[in-house]
């Protein structure tokens, strides 16, 4: 049967390169450490796990379609108005709603060259055109973004901190970016890794959202809260943006377990602080050890490191390192699709994994 005799996707869909997550296994290896997905090595809060288990009697009922308990928990812990909060099946779902609501064929959305791949996928899915601008030293370049703004620009997507580089944009630079944008352009600040940042010049975006009509901040429970399996995201946005996205949101997009476990997780500040402290300790240790091995490491404020290999030595390339490490049970993330063909992204893992991956790299680089 030819393609003319079957349903066909709308124009442009088959031109999209599907998002491909990092591998999570090493066939034939007894003990595997998955250091490819930026998951928390400390896992979920015990209170979140308890709340998850307590949901069992509710499984025969539809969940609360407004996720009221979760929205109220977020508002309570973050000092926000619940009316400005919307929850989704991961922040990716919310980003998709934003592109569908605010982008149309002929529109442009600005993304950065090493930004999260989903921004491009969702912009194309909305029928709009992604405009990719350069970064400088693996950091978002505000001037490059502002130079790319045209009358067709309807949105700007910034991951802050960025994945996979781990770099961040100081809040004054975010302010400068916002000040240079037309008020009709939506600035989306993806702050998935914000809890890990320990810098005085960083702010996730709450202040800008609160004071303006064209800024949205998205967050996730998949990183510091250790709940990626439940797919929980949330956004803080002006009421008019919430209203537009609500018209696209499917009913019951969050399940009961996600609502209750998420509410318990965000209230467990001790677990969050423990996870952040652990990350700070081992992020610094890993960066020092990798640098001592002669590898260039992009300075990171998140829970992962971008590790660069010698492009002039084919035997010590990222591809060869990835194969070697996988055979030893250490699964890292290839980041070729992000513009780094000779780098690997390494997630901070359990202590034995952190020490083990350094020992394996030491052996590989001999």
Image (cartoon, rainbow, N blue to C red):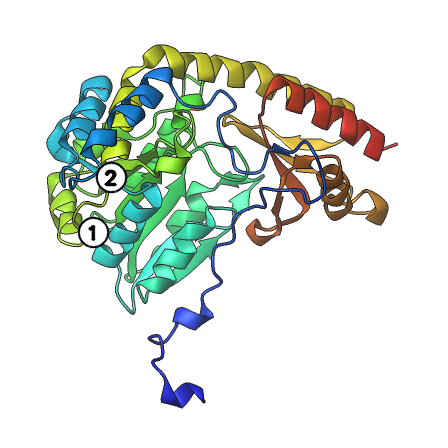
Q: Is residue 65 above or below residue 210?
A: below
Badge count: 2
Q: Position of residue 211 (x, y in %)?
A: 18, 31
- Figure quadrant of the N terminus: bottom left
Residue drawn at point x = 28 percent, y = 33 percent: 258
Local secondary structure at mark 2: loop
Q: Which mark is residue 255?
A: 2
Given residues 223 and 147, the one toward you in this image is 223
Q: Which mark is residue 184?
A: 1
Given residues 346 and 116, the one toward you in this image is 346
Q: Residues within 10 Å of mark 1 (few under 14, many from 20)?
A: few
Q: Quadrant of residue 203?
A: top left
Residue drawn at point x = 29 percent, y = 44 percent: 187
- Please indicate, yes or no, whether residue 353 appears anywhere in the rendered image: yes
Local secondary structure at mark 1: loop
Q: Quadrant of residue 174?
A: top left
Q: Which mark is residue 159?
A: none
Q: Position of residue 236 (x, y in %)?
A: 22, 34
Q: Quadrant of residue 57?
A: top left
Mark closer to the chain start, 1 or 2: 1
């Amino acid at each position: 049967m030819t393609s003319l005799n079957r349903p066909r996707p709308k124009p442009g869909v088959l031109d999209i390169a599907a998002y491909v997550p990092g591998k999570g296994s090493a066939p034939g290896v007894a003990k595997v450490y998955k250091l490819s997905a930026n998951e928390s090595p400390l896992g979920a809060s015990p209170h979140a796990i308890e709340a998850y288990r307590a949901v069992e009697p509710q499984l025969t009922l539809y969940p609360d379609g407004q996720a009221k308990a979760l929205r109220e928990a977020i508002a309570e812990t973050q000092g926000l108005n619940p009316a400005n909060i919307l929850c989704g099946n991961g922040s990716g779902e919310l980003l998709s709603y934003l592109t569908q609501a605010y982008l149309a064929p002929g529109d442009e959305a600005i993304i950065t060259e090493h930004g999260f791949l989903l921004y491009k996928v969702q912009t194309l899915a909305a029928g709009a055109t992604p405009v990719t601008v350069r970064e400088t030293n693996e950091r978002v370049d505000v001037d490059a973004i502002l130079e790319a703004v045209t009358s067709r620009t309807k949105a700007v997507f910034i991951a802050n901190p960025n994945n996979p580089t781990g770099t961040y944009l100081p809040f004054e630079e975010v302010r400068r970016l916002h000040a240079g944008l037309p008020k009709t352009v939506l600035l989306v600040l993806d702050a998935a890794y914000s809890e890990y940042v320990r810098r005085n010049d960083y702010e996730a975006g709450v202040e800008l959202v609160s004071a303006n009509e064209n800024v949205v901040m998205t967050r996730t429970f998949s990183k510091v809260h250790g709940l990626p399996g439940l797919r929980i995201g949330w956004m803080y946005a002006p009421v008019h943006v919430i209203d537009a996205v609500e018209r696209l949101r499917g009913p019951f997009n969050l399940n009961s377990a996600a609502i209750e476990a998420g509410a318990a997780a965000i209230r467990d500040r001790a677990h969050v602080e423990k996870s952040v402290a652990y990350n700070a300790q081992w992020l610094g240790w890993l960066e020092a050890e990798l640098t001592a091995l002669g590898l260039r490491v992009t300075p990171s404020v998140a829970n992962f490191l971008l590790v660069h290999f010698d492009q002039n030595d084919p035997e010590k390339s990222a591809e060869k390192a990835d194969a070697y490490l996988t055979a030893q049970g250490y699964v890292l993330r290839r980041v070729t699709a992000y513009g780094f063909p000779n780098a690997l992204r390494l997630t901070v893992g359990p202590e034995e994994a952190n020490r083990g991956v350094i020992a394996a790299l030491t052996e590989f680089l001999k």
